[in-house]
Amino acid sequence: MYRNLTSALLFCALWLCAPLVASAVTMQWSPVGNPGNANDPATGNMFGGVAYNYQIGTYDVTNSQYVEFLNAKDPAGTNALFLWTSNMMLDTFGGMNYTAGNSVGSKYSAKSGSGEHPVNMLNWYSAIRFANWMNNGQGNGDTETGAYTLGPLGPGAEPINGNSITRNPGATVFLPSESEWYKAAYYNPGTNSYYLYPTSSNTTPTGSAPTALPNHANFNPDGPATLTDVGAYSGTTSPYGAFDMGGNVFQYNEAFFGDGLRGIRGGTFGLNEVRLRSTFQGTQLPTLGGGGTGFRVATVPEPSSLVLAALGLGGLAANGWRKRRLKMMDLS
């Protein structure tokens, strides 16, 4: 039937080996090329350089996508891993509901008009559990292993190893490292330099309602003072085509600080343009989640050991810079 072994293997890859059920969550990716770029001098040459090609989520993870995750991994609504919090429903800026009377597998739903808002009110551990689930193929995919290993668990499903969690070898979907996030947000490949803002500009963006005009974003004081749909500022992207890397919500990254905090970058609808700048490095406790913090994921298909080594060396160097940084306030 087949002319050669290659044809047979291709048939298997496309048909016989394909998953029986399509993934519930589809991510759009923005490729980030130009491997081997230098770090940004504005950070003391510590951030922005990435030695390999990768992809960043074109959009923040939305409430609708996170609802699919919840209904897949917590179909009975027991919330054993605290992936959902009551603030997601009760807070003004929360975007999803929990209905105990709904059938198994449909306990969670996005609030009307909030499905395309970035998910918020979740902590760093929930974000990496979502990444594990994506990494493991969704569906029944594990949340405790994969891109990251969580556990053993303590009260509130908080990993006892929380301070030592790093990306595992072979991870394919994960939170971006600080340099991966930074490069996707600020690096200008045309000039081999960095923008000050993640709106492809060195000029202060205009805070406004959603618009197709360039260099606009959702931040205080002139923005809408609430969350907006991902991609609503359709004329403004990072240099690599990702939306909302400035404003709307801060986004978690993998950065770890010696005092137990994890990194956030990008600014939020409730704070001013200073938080959008490349020079602003925010932090947040991994157990806290707020209305102004969400996340996006990134991917490197089958990363090599060289890539992982580069990540590790970058983390060690960045830690030295962090020790010299000004103490940032918790912005949850």
Image (cartoon, helix red, strand yellow):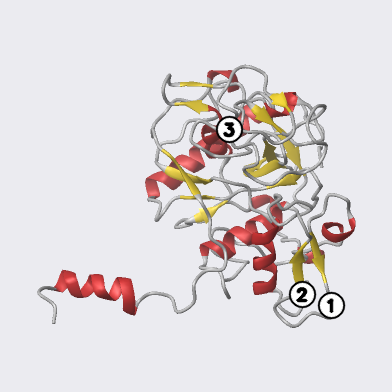
For residue 303, side relative to residue 111 (left or right):
left
- Residue 314 in picture, x, y percent from top left: 51, 36
Give the Cα separation between the discs numbered 3 and 1.
Answer: 41 Å
For residue 1, side relative to residue 286 (left or right):
left
Q: Are marks 1 and 2 in contact (CB under 8 Å)?
A: yes
The image quarter in which residue 139 lies: bottom right
- Residue 41 in picture, x, y percent from top left: 54, 18
Numbered circle sitting on residue 235 = 3
Give the residue drawn at x 48%, y 57%. Answer: 171
Extreme residue in the left direction:
3
Which corner quadrant holds the C terminus?
top right
Give the residue drawn at x 23%, y 72%. Answer: 9
Numbered circle sitting on residue 100 = 1
Nearer the observer, 109 or 328 = 109
Q: Nearer the viewer, mark 3 or mark 1?
A: 3
Q: Earlier in the sequence, mark 1 or mark 2?
A: 1
Q: Is residue 161 visible?
A: no
325 is higher (above) or lower (below) than 284: above
Q: Is residue 213 visible?
A: yes
- Residue 272 in picture, x, y percent from top left: 78, 26
- Residue 160 in picture, x, y percent from top left: 72, 60
Residue type pointed to by label 1: Ala
SS class of the residue under badge 3? loop
What residue is pinned by disc 2?
107
4 is higher (above) or lower (below) than 256: below
